[in-house]
Image (tube, rainbow, N blue to C red):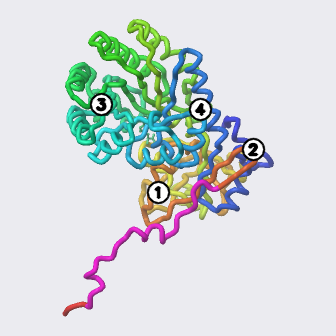
Amino acid sequence: MKLPSHLTVSNNNLFIGGHDCNLLASEYGTPLYVTSEDRILQNYSDFFKALKTHYDPVRILYAAKANGNLAIFRALAQLGAGADVFSTGELRLAEIAGMPHDRLLFNGSSKTKEDLALAVEKGVTVTLDSIDELHKLDTIADESRSKAQVSFRVNPAINVPTHPKIATGLSTSKFGIPHQKIIPAYMEALSCENITPAGIHCHIGSQILATEPFVKATEVMMQLACELHDLSIRFSFVDLGGGLGIPYRHGVDKAPSYREYADAVMPVFLKGIKEMNEHPQLWVEPGRSLVADSTVLLTRVNSVKEAHRRFVNVDAGFNLLIRPTMYEAYHEIVVANKADSPCTAEYTITGPICETGDVFAEGRLLPEIKAGDLVALLDTGAYGFSMSSQYNTRPRCAEVILKGRDKSLMRRKETIEDITRTMVTPPWQDEPRRS
Ligand code: LLP
């Protein structure tokens, strides 16, 4: 298996960012997420440069849902990133990390009154997903005597080659406003006293391994922007969303590089703005491509069982990484204390959760595995911890972040008390039992 440059092998042990995974696992315990901050910063600056070669001003809005750890937000904020936030919680995280409000975009297909009121109060631009939402926002802005800046999310009706659960720009998808209805939507916005159209937004899906769908979406977006420009609507930003995939199967999947993405999409964008004779900011919203490959999930082998398959029972389950169960997602596996040993047998890696679907990988060819070995699941920095749960009353694990030679916890392991703290015993259970 080909490893990216921040993952190395020395004396049969797997290293991330120059740190031995085995030592990290012994020091912090398992399961454990370990993230290389340097790798995230490298990804960010590669993407930024690729876009900047074509155009200025560019803004990268980190898709907060990919990994909501504050340390990651702060690292990106320091580089000038903004964020695509999809909830009040993500907005708060971005604020705490020091991202200015004008670098945030409040996306979402089903926002509450409270979500919208917070966006108005903070002056955060809102992406609207329905006409209902437009009117709700107009009323809220009116009540607080403010103006709300908005974009509409365009559904460009594009088939995207990815898992159906993460294709969002299909005509049947719940997201966005059908592209044929976008012009009337902006016209309606113009008639609302407290609404200012500021931009236009789309996001066609995730883990996309080709540039064509992005090009098609950009064509739809620029066509709409030009038509709206003719109707005197001037945008200060055009947001092309996120979605660029990564090669989860090392050496097999081929993902477009940032450069390839930019070289494909930017000519369409530039042609559109030339036609309008305008100079809006270009916004993109990457999540996965910035953070996925920065992280490994380390998990200890509890037992190995020869049944109809050779099962390896590890101490992490879909409570900590649900992608294989939810999307049949593939993650490379390295036995971190036998990283250079020859692969001799096929193993099925399963977690401790009381569900048959709690399987990370089936029939993987790996070195001989024994109880006590350390397994590393690669590319788990996006939609890993952020989709974790406490199912089976399992406290979530710790997360460690590395920068150069430094290492630090970025989240401590939860305790059972963390789980029970929010539970309330109803008063009648304290009363003496009546017969
Ligand atoms: N912008 C919006 C509005 C989004 O909904 C998303 C992701 C992104 C940007 C970032 O997309 P990315 O660059 O990460 O592909 N849990 C799934 C992925 C769900 C993506 C949700 N939206 C997975 O584990 O594959």
Between circles 4 and 2, the one closer to the viewer is: 4
Q: Which mark is residue 44?
A: 4
Give the residue type at disc 3. Gly
Label 4 near ligand 1 (CB < 8 Å)? no
Q: Which mark is residue 176?
A: 3
Label 3 near ligand 1 (CB < 8 Å)? no
Q: Distance between the residues labelled 1 and 4?
A: 29 Å
Label 4 sits on a secondary structure element that is helix
Q: Which tag, 3 or 4, sits closer to the chain's start? A: 4
Q: Which tag, 2 or 3, sits closer to the chain's start? A: 2
Give yes or no for contact between labels 1 and 2 (Cβ–Cβ under 8 Å): no
Task: In this rendered view, identify the residue nearer to me: 27 or 335.
Answer: 27
Label 1 sits on a secondary structure element that is loop
Q: Which tag, 4 or 2, sits closer to the chain's start? A: 2
Hey, which residue is sitting farthest right in the picture?
11
Q: Which mark is residue 9?
A: 2
Q: Which tag, 3 or 1, sits closer to the chain's start? A: 3
Hey, which residue is sitting farthest bottom in the picture?
435
Between circles 3 and 1, the one closer to the viewer is: 3
Residue designated by label 1 = 319
Give the residue type at disc 4. Tyr
Q: In which quarter of the image is residue 65?
A: top left
Q: What stretch is highlighted in magenta?
A: 409-432
Task: Determine crowd level at label 4: few under 14, some 14-19, many 20+ residues with C-alpha closer than 10 A.
Answer: many
Label 3 sits on a secondary structure element that is loop
Give the residue type at disc 2. Val
